[in-house]
Amino acid sequence: MWITGLAIALTLPTTAFHAATAQAPPPAGQPLRLEADVTEANAVTGVITARGNVRITYPARQIQATAVQAQYFSRERRIVLSGNVYVLQEGNSLRGEVVTYLVDEGRFLALPDRGQQVEAIYIVPDPNPTTGSNPAAPPAFNPKPEFKLPESPE
C-alpha cells in the first residue's frame, strides 16, 4: 500500500527510556508522528517505510528528526533513519548518514557516510554552576591589541 503526502502517528510505550533517565514516564501510548512525501506500510512484515522530506516528532521523548528515508520495524521496535539524518533531543543533536533508534532502550546508534564522521553535540550539565558574573573568566580575546610606542630612556 502506497500513501502519498501523509502523516502517520505511531503509538509507542515509553517507560524504559524514562526509567533509565530518572524522568517521570509520560502517559502510555504517546504517538510518534511521521511525515513524508511517500509512505508505504506492509501489513505482512510490519514495516512502515517513509521516503522524501521525512520528519519525525516524538513529544513523549522530546525527539525531532529529519532524514531522506525512515523505516519503522514494528516487531523489533526500532526506527532506521537514513540520508542526511539530523536528530534533536532536549538540546542534544546528532548528525549522520544512518541513525538507528531503539525505541524500548531509548538509545541511538549513528553511522557516518563513507569518509565522514558522525557529529554529536551534547549539553553537559555543570555540577557547580555559578550565578552572576564569573570572576575567573579570562579576558575577551582581542586579535589586535592596542599599539604601544616604545619607551626610550631619557
Image (cartoon, grey):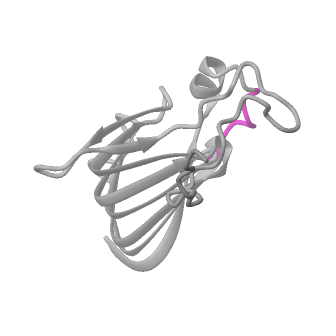
Percent x, y of residue 112: 22, 46
- Quarter assignment of residue 135: top right
Name the residue rendered at 62%, 41% in the picture: 61
- Locate residue 136 relative to residue 85 in the image: left or right: right
Say whether residue 84 is left or right of residue 13: left
Residue sticking out furthest to the left: 114
Identity of the residue furthest to the right in this view: 132
> Residue 67: x percent and y percent?
36, 62
Residue 107 sits in which quadrant? top left
Please tell me which residue is depicted at 58% across the width and 27% down the height of the picture.
Answer: 17
Residue situated in front as seen by the camera: 149 or 132: 149
Residue closest to the far front: 154
**Magenta-drawn stretch, dominant element (helix, strand or loop):** loop
Q: Say above or below: 84 vs 26.
A: below
- Point 52% across, 37% down: residue: 122
Q: Is residue 25 magenta?
A: yes
Q: Position of residue 21 (x, y in %)?
A: 63, 22
Kindly tell me whether residue 3 is visible in this rendering.
Answer: yes
Q: Position of residue 76 (x, y in %)?
A: 35, 34
Note whether residue 42 is visible.
Answer: no
Return the residue nearer the eye: 112 or 54.
112
Picture layout, residue 92 above or below residue 6 = above
The residue shown at (76%, 27%) is 24
Nearer the observer, 124 or 67:
124
Residue 29 part of the magenta-drawn span? yes
Q: Is residue 99 left or right of residue 114?
A: right
For the magenta stretch, what is the residue range?
A: 24-30
Number of marks:
0
Quarter the N terminus occupies:
bottom left
